[in-house]
Amino acid sequence: MGCFDVVLLRCPTCGEEYPAQSKGAGDWDMDDTYYLSEAPDDVLTDVNRHAPFVCTCKTVFQVDVAKRLVVKLDITPEEAERRQVDYLMPAVNALLREKLN
């Protein structure tokens, strides 16, 4: 289990609070929670690392870091899940290759 900060986002459709993990570029004493508007720049460097996010209302969104805004994406929750898996696959494949060698 790694250390991370949490950035609290609001779903752009229903307003439900969504916790996004960030390992950021800050110090290693990560265990802070921030609202998007108050998060330090270094924490926001990888706030989208598990994006796109899917709310319980099925809205898909991510953070526009430059504007510090949550933006709705025009994709399905299924497409969002596929993108998350595609993002993780290189790391998973590398681990599998390492274990097999």
Image (spheres, grey):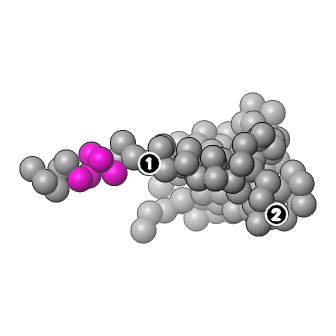
Q: Magenta stretch mostly in which secondary structure?
A: helix
Q: Position of residue 89 (x, y in %)?
A: 39, 46
- The three-letter amino acid code for the residue at tag 2 is Cys
Instruction: Say if residue 57 shows up in the picture.
Output: yes
Crowding at dot 2, Cα within 10 Å, few <14 / some 14-19 / many 20+, comes out as: few
Alpha carbon of mark 1 to alpha carbon of mark 2: how far?
24 Å
Figure quadrant of the N terminus:
bottom left
Q: Position of residue 74 (x, y in %)?
A: 78, 40
Seen at 64% across and 53% down, the residue is 78
Which residue corresponds to mark 2?
A: 57
Choose between 86 and 37: the one closer to the eye: 86
Q: Which residues are magenta?
A: 92-96
Q: Is residue 31 left or right of residue 60?
A: left
Choose the circle earlier in sequence order: 1 or 2: 2
**Does 43 appear in magenta?**
no
For numbered disc 1, what is the local secondary structure? helix
Numbered tag placed on residue 37 in the rendering = none
Numbered tag placed on residue 88 in the rendering = 1
The quadrant holding residue 64 is: top right
Instruction: Say if residue 7 shows up in the picture.
Output: no
Q: Nearer the viewer, mark 1 or mark 2?
A: 2
Q: Position of residue 54 (x, y in %)?
A: 71, 57
Q: Is residue 15 left or right of residue 51?
A: right
